[in-house]
Amino acid sequence: MLEVNHLTKVYPNGTQALNDVSFKVEKGEFLVIIGLSGSGKSTLLRCINRLHDSTSGSILFEGEDITQLSNSGIRKVRAKIGMIFQHFNLVPRTTVLTNVLTGSLSKNGIIRSILGIWPEEDKKKALEYIKIVGLSGKENTRADNLSGGQQQRVSIARALMQNPKILLADEPVASLDPATSHSVMQYLKKVNEELGVTVICNLHFLSLVRQYASRVIALKGGKMIYEGSPKEIDEQWFKTIYGEDAVEVTID
């Protein structure tokens, strides 16, 4: 489904965020990317959905090199690639239902969304996705009245409105407490297994990685230094990825 070949990203200030990164993603995988802050994880996701332009290399999505696309081509690709951010990016004063419906903006347009004109079919879909993420009964609640974990689940439902083939999650539990982190990860896993959506997720905590990932890649200084099963990341690999003085923190 996705093939990243020799991807390099150098920012205008000279910082090399990615250095010759290559990997493949199969349909239905739950791939987790790990590494220290600044290792290139977020940059990699932003290159995949073309929020950032890569410096060199290619990203093949369904066989097409999306690094070469024009603006109209990028919009079409983004409609197939959902994105979940660390800080939710919801509209605080609008309802859960409206926030979820904004996931269909690429199809319905901005004017219709401002006027609150949504097709009945989209409303039905939105209610289904709200149910999938465990928020039935919260449809008319304002987003800013929800807990952090609930807001992140709204952002998952919003991303599903795109009917994405791949869901990118950039540190989706970084700002949440341990119990809530597991809740959000369980819903991401549910989307992966029950809806067949391929998930690529950036995470910090190896305890979560071992529980939810089907495969792991690790970045360090922009280079990919590990690819394989989460179960094979032993203490030595942990030290290699995070540094000799690093101590693993477990989320129970």
Image (cartoon, helix red, strand yellow):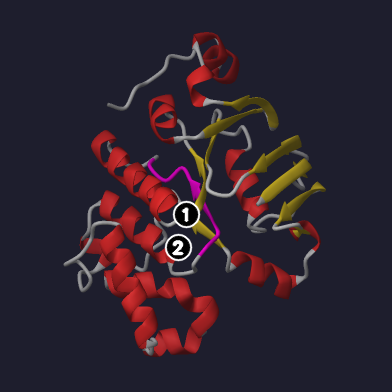
At 20% from the left and 62% from the top, the residue drawn is: 145
Q: Quadrant of residue 189?
A: top left
Tag 1 secondary structure: loop
Horizontal and vertical percent for residue 241?
58, 20
Q: Which amino acid, by three-letter code, is at mark 1? A: Gly
Q: Which amino acid, by three-letter code, is at mark 2? A: Ala
* Real-space Cα separation, disc 2 to disc 1, in angstroms: 14 Å
Q: Is residue 139 magenta?
A: no
Compared with 237, 127 (above or below) is below
Q: Give the mark nearer the N terminus: 2 vs 1.
A: 2
Q: Is residue 231 visible?
A: yes
In this picture, residue 41 sits left or right of residue 55: left
Tally the numbered discs.
2
Q: Nearer the viewer, residue 244 or 27?
A: 27
- The numbered mark at residue 11 is none
- The numbered mark at residue 196 is 1
At 55% from the left and 31% from the top, the residue drawn is: 216
Q: Quadrant of residue 91?
A: bottom left
Horizontal and vertical percent for residue 128?
31, 69
Horizontal and vertical percent for residue 20?
78, 35
At 72% from the left and 71% from the top, the residue drawn is: 73
Horizontal and vertical percent for residue 92?
31, 67
In this picture, residue 95 sits left or right of residue 111: left
Verify CB contact (< 8 Å) between mark 2 and mark 1: no
At 34% from the left and 72% from the top, the residue drawn is: 126
> What residue span does the magenta drawing correspond to?
164-173
- For mark 2, what is the residue? 159
